[in-house]
Image (spheres, rainbow, N blue to C red):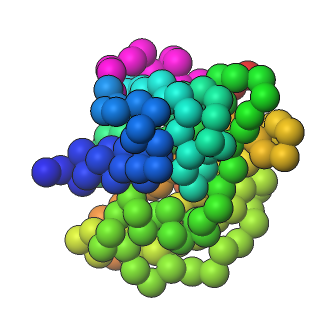
Amino acid sequence: MTLWKALLVAIACCIVAAGARAQSTPVWTDIDCLQLRIPAAIGLKCQGINLTGVASQETSPSGTFRQLIASGAIKRVKLFYLLLETTSLQTGVSTRSTLAETMKQLIPQASNFSELTPRHGVDFVTFTGAADDACIGVRRLGTAAIAEYKWLVFALRCVPAKTTVPDADIAAFIASTKPNS
């Protein structure tokens, strides 16, 4: 199983584990990356799923939600974006786990996490990924909705081990995690 398929499976399990009774088996469909509303996702493989009545670490126990994922590699840089958003008015999404815990769910081999740092409007960590990749993990909290948010973005950027990542690349990646309206 490739790293990106493993990520999709891990996220699906994380999001739907507590809500299996409301929607028995999640069905991922290929989507146009424009639906993700993250311009950097264009050119990656994009998939989506609609969820109903799912209670998890990110979603309320009622309401409807949409989860959109983009993943792939461009010039040896592995990229992964997850947009989780509510599609109903009286509910929201939130995060009840640390960013490091979420990254560990996505890449079980992840280790050597930095301290969580706010940076350019996101929560930011660096860590070592699979095959000793140098990785960046980002969590961007969306617009407020009730006591939660209308959307959340989680994103990963991994480069081969011992690759130096310039600050400008990090800033560009962080900027790329902001969805269009």
Q: Quadrant of residue 152?
A: top right
Q: Residue at x 62, y 42 (%)?
A: 61
How many tags in the picture? Answer: 0
Name above or below for residue 4 compared with residue 49. below
**Residue 87 image position (x, y, % from top left):** 65, 23
Q: Residue 91: percent from the left, percent from the top? A: 74, 34
Q: Identify the residue at image location x=33%, y=44%.
A: 8
Q: Is residue 80 visible?
A: no
Q: Residue furthest front?
A: 21
Q: Quadrant of residue 148?
A: top right
Residue lying at 53% horizontally and 28% vertically, measured from the top left? 52
The residue positioned 57% from the left and 80% from the top of the image is 114
Quadrant location of the C terminus in the rendered image: top right
- Image coordinates for residue 122, horizontal then vertical, percent: 71, 56
Q: In the image, 73: left or right of 86?
A: left
| Left or right: 148 in relation to 64 | right
Q: Is residue 166 magenta?
A: no
Counting from the top left corner in percent of width and height, residue 80 is at: 42, 46
Q: Looking at the picture, does residue 95 appear above or below residue 101?
A: above
Q: Residue furthest left?
A: 1
> Which residue occupies the foreground of this view, 23 or 170?
23
Is residue 25 visible in the rendered structure shown here? Answer: yes
Q: Which residues are magenta?
A: 28-41
**Which of these two is toward me, 54 or 36?**
54
- The question of residue 29 being in magenta is answered with yes
